[in-house]
Image (cartoon, helix red, strand yellow):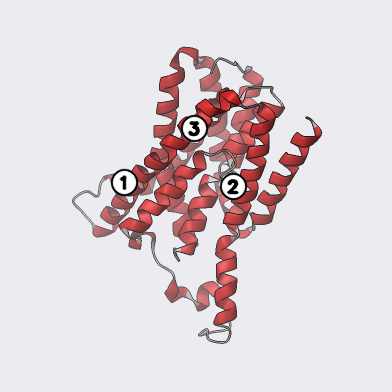
């Protein structure tokens, strides 16, 4: 991280990360776009800062879901429910690493050879892709609704009328857990939303939305730890401790302060069109500033 950022920039980035992390809009893509276009950073350094910013919001997620984490960690020889969740986390983490590692290497070292404008265009395109991914569960439900119109048990909402079709997170198979991890690993690409991709996958597998939100953020913890550790190994000589602590504190405070309201907001708002719009705006801004 040779291209240093200022303390004010660090605090701004932490605030943006703290808010964007709980929305399915790729906090990595948003902070990288900001660093490249507003702060004049090169893509390689912007990736490292964007990855480190997740450390603060990861701590916020641990504090928020501390009860779930303590149950899982204490369940090795106890209840089947927690053991099933533990195996899901382990398998998802393994396949996250297998997917993310080659993508990280390609982006980190490939970014040296490309301009910030090219990277900004890539972020915009991947935000559009995120929007399409987020719309997949809704499109799937709409197709099923057309095929099953009039078959429901009641005239209520789809969730109450089709409650028997939904599963608990612990019912995910090993294969589904591996696919979940692979989907999370793809979110190392700036513009692909980690939470949006994993939650969309879980909803497509008929996991209840509240369980999908919870497991998405639980499996993010080992993924973030691994990504931050690997990135710091290659940049430890350039790491500014004061700037790093400032980013961590800012992202943690804003992340923890906004997690409840933004998770509720994200559960009722359709972000598919929003992500596509943000992606198009990013591309247009990049073109106009070339």
* 60 is higher (above) or lower (below) than 158: above
Between the residue at mark 3 and the residue at mark 2, the CA separation in whole angstroms equals: 26 Å
Q: Is residue 113 left or right of residue 99?
A: right
> Around disc 2, counting alpha carbons within 10 Å, would you say few (fewer than 14), some (14 to 19), or many (20 or more)?
many
Q: Earlier in the sequence, mark 1 or mark 3?
A: 1
- Residue under the point 44% across and 39% down: 100
Q: Give the secondary structure at mark 2.
A: loop
Residue under label 2: 23
Residue under label 1: 90
Residue 159 image label: none
Q: Earlier in the sequence, mark 3 or mark 2?
A: 2
Residue under label 3: 106
> Around disc 3, counting alpha carbons within 10 Å, would you say few (fewer than 14), some (14 to 19), or many (20 or more)?
few
Q: Position of residue 230 (x, y in %)?
A: 41, 27
Is there any visible trace of residue 71 in the rendered image? no
Q: For residue 84, which quarter of the picture?
A: bottom left
């Amino acid at each position: 991280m040779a291209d240093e950022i200022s303390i004010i920039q660090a605090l701004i980035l932490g605030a943006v990360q703290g808010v964007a992390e709980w929305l399915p809009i790729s906090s990595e893509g948003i902070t990288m776009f900001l660093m490249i276009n507003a702060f004049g950073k090169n893509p390689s350094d912007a990736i490292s800062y964007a990855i480190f910013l997740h450390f603060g919001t990861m701590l916020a997620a641990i504090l928020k879901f501390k009860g779930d984490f303590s149950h899982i960690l204490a369940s090795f020889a106890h209840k089947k429910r927690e053991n099933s969740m533990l195996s899901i986390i382990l398998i998802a983490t393994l396949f996250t690493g297998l997917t993310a590692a080659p993508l990280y290497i390609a982006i980190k070292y490939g970014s040296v050879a490309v301009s910030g404008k090219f990277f900004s265009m890539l972020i915009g395109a991947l935000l559009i892709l995120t929007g399409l991914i987020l719309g997949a569960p809704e499109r799937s439900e709409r197709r099923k609704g057309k095929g099953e119109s009039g078959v429901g048990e009641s005239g209520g909402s789809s969730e109450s009328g089709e409650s028997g079709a939904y599963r608990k997170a612990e019912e995910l198979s090993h294969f589904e857990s591996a696919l979940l991890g692979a989907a999370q690993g793809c979110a190392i690409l700036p513009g692909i939303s980690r939470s949006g991709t994993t939650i969309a996958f879980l909803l497509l597998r008929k996991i209840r939305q509240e369980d999908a939100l919870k497991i998405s953020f639980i499996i993010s913890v080992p993924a973030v730890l691994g990504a931050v550790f690997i990135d710091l190994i290659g940049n430890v000589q350039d790491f500014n401790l004061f700037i790093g602590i400032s980013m961590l504190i800012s992202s943690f405070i804003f992340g923890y302060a906004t997690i409840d309201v933004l998770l509720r907001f994200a559960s009722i708002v359709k972000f598919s069109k929003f992500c596509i719009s943000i992606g198009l705006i990013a591309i247009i801004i990049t073109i106009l500033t070339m």
